[in-house]
Amino acid sequence: MEQATSIILIACAAFVLPLVSARLHVSAITLEILFGIAVGPFMLNLVAQSPLLDFLAEFGLFLLMFLSGFEIDFGSIEKQGPRQLALGAGTFAVILGLSFWLAHLMGYGPFVTFLLATTSLGIVVPTLRTTRRTATRLGQFILITALMADFLALIGVTLFALIHEHGPGWSLLSIPLLFVVVAVLLVVLKRVVWWHPEWFERLFISNDPSELGIRASLALMFVIVGLSYALDIEPILGAFLAGTVFALVFRNRGSLEQQLSGFSYGFLIPIFFINVGLCFDISGLLGPGVLLDALLLIGAAIAVKLLPPFLVLRRLPAREILGSGVLLTANLSLAVVIVTLGIRIGAMDPALRSSVVLLAVVTSIFAPTCFRLLAPPLPPAAPGSPGSPEARGKAAV
């Protein structure tokens, strides 16, 4: 009976919470975590954890990482050129250095270093879209830096997870081996698509009754996740790489991206975040010094993002430069993934989960709100201007 009640409540929440988040102008992910806290065993105790819920949450985590790679616009990145990529990588290097220094001062290890350095594309992208700044120099800098932070932080966390579990040795070769296998798979898929594009047309038909596009996406994800398990690598990296392979092979994905996002964000990914809230022990924040540690962690996550943009974006107004640093402080999905992984392998204290969830909730509200104040939405592009729909249409012709 408890399991049935839990599933019903979660199903209703997955439908209602996005509607509420739109009204409150708050990320749906934030409300999902808060809902999990409210109905979890440490507050109302309405939802009980179960093997089924854990399985669905794990599946949602894989889909979240897959879509993080799947939604990368490699065409836009290529247009920016190597200079923009180097700029983003350099900015992330400065952020990572500051994160290491502050994490060391607070007595934490490498997992917290990457946790402080990462950001949230799930908040950055919608915020830039709503402020109409995606195509601006500021917007492109934020996008590239956020992408670098997510990708490189995930690689770093996976590497340190291997070292923590197996120590330095031959096991570290499993990561480059996975990349080699994925690269071979990428080349083969590109060649097949090039020579036989008609074989893949059905993947992107919106009214396909067999939904072969979704089947192919999930099959690719589980194949690479399975390889990750075989090589004893964290499967979240495999799921992310599967998404990037799909994005690199199929640049124009048509309605498939919307279908897959609807399937994933409509139920399974919310279950992952609700499950994060269920594991949030709110009483843990009441322990001696725990709340202070959580506030220090939040302050550090904000501090490491504010300085680097001033070293790079020198010609923009100071408030916009500050706004870019503020938006990069958004720390949501990947931060939760990192702490989940760290606790799972014993590299992080379980007490840190509460602090990280609080960090995710605070920054997911703080970052987009302050960015809109510091860098207000731009007016719509005038007809015929480079960013207008008319100009884009002429360019397409």
Image (tube, helix red, strand yellow):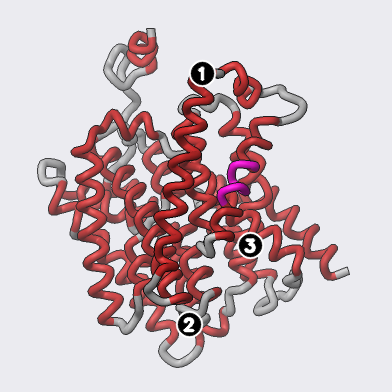
State which quadrant residue 289 falls in. bottom left
At a point 30% along the width and 64% down the height, the residue shown is 302
From this view, report whether residue 118 is shown above or below residue 246: below
Is the residue marked by circle 1 packed among few (<14), some (14-19), or many (20+) residues within 10 Å? few
Secondary element at image label 1: helix
Label for residue 275?
none
**Residue 106 visible (yes or no):** yes
The residue lying toward the viewer, choosing from 149 and 292, is: 149
Q: Is residue 226 magenta?
A: no
Query: Which residues are drawn in magenta?
Result: 219-224
Q: Which residue is mark 1?
A: 195
**In the rendered image, is residue 366 in sight?**
no
Image coords of residue 242 (percent x, y):
52, 44
User: Pointer 2: what residue?
Assistant: 349
Dot 2: within a 10 Å radius of its alpha carbon, few (fewer than 14), some, or many (20 or more) residues? few
- Checking the image for residue 274, the label placed there is 3
Please name which of the two marks, 3 or 1, marks the residue nearer to the observer.
1
Question: Which of 155 and 46 lies nearest the eye of the viewer?
Answer: 155
Q: Amino acid at mark 1?
A: Trp
Instruction: Check the picture and name the quadrant holding the N terminus.
Output: bottom right
Separation (CA) of disc 2 from disc 1: 52 Å
At mark 2, the secondary structure is: loop
